[in-house]
Amino acid sequence: MGRGGIYYFKRATVTYYQACLTLARKMVRVFALALDQPEDAFDGMSIFLGANGTINFYPPIRVSTENENGAEDSIGIGSHTDIQSFTLLYQDDVGGLNIINLDNEWIEATPVPGTFIVNIGDFLMRTTNDRWKSTVHRVNTNRSEKPRMSLPLFFGFNLSHRCAVLDSCIDSEHPAKYPPYVNMLMNKFFNKQTVESK
Ligand SMILES: O=C(O)CCC(=O)C(=O)O
Ligand SMILES: [Fe+2]
């Protein structure tokens, strides 16, 4: 890519990122209503937020090889949940993303043109007292002919936000499972500092 290419790449990336943020800020209003909260309940938490975007590239791996343990080598992403509030995930048409459904089975998240996948993250799961579950997902080795790309935007509430389980997610059968807490990313950062300074 020449220098001009980098310029257009940056411009397209920033434009995409900003459009995702605009969409995400609209989505938190839908989420608030769905959780029986005032529409603007999350607005103030979505200002100085931690929102990271990445571009994931999965090269095609046509030849299957074994590592020293006899297991098949893989290049993908192991099963995990995203830690922020939610993820807006664009994937191209190659496929390979799997999620665990409510029956605890791995299923394909088959690409649907013109759509995003929305993965609930751990932070929103805690905020909703586990009413909304963070999605366990993984990406398999790309065995297709062509490279795969995905663009996740991990949308988190304000890093300093001290958040409690929403009152609308608590009742006599569902007492609050979590004490008030500061945004997890911040906690993670502090924990890391503490461990490293020991
Ligand atoms: O590539 C994908 O479809 C998912 C990527 C992902 O799970 C992640 O970056 O956290
Ligand atoms: Fe993920």
Image: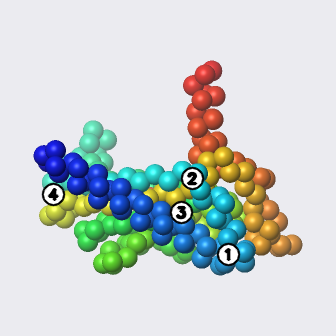
Q: Secondary structure at mark 4?
A: loop
The residue under label 4 is: 62
Res 13 → quadrant: bottom left
**Pointer 1 or 4: first along the chain:** 1
Distance from Cα at disc 4 to Cα at disc 3: 33 Å
> What residue lies at 33% left-to-right and 77% top-to-bottom?
114
- Assign the C terminus to one quadrant of the image: top right
Q: Position of residue 94 (x, y in %)?
A: 25, 68
**Residue type (three-letter) at the residue carrying disc 3:** Phe
Q: Residues within 10 Å of mark 2 (few under 14, many from 20)?
A: some
Residue 106 in sight in this render: no
**Residue type (three-letter) at the residue carrying disc 4:** Arg
Q: Are marks 1 and 2 in contact (CB under 8 Å)?
A: no
Q: Quick one: 50 or 96, which is closer to the camera?
A: 50
Height in image: 99 above or below 195? below
Beta carbon at label 2 within 8 Å of ligand 1 = no
**Residue type (three-letter) at the residue carrying disc 1:** Glu
Q: Quick one: 86 or 95, which is closer to the camera?
A: 86
Horizontally, residue 96 falls left or right of residue 168, namely left
Height in image: 50 above or below 103? above
The residue under label 3 is: 86
The residue under label 2 is: 49
Q: Secondary structure at mark 3?
A: strand
**Residue type (three-letter) at the residue carrying disc 2:** Leu
Report the disc number at residue 140: none
Depth check, mark 2 against mark 3: the one in front is 2
**Pointer 3 or 1: first along the chain:** 1
Q: Position of residue 14 (x, y in %)?
A: 36, 56
Q: Secondary structure at mark 1?
A: loop
Q: Position of residue 193 (x, y in %)?
A: 60, 29
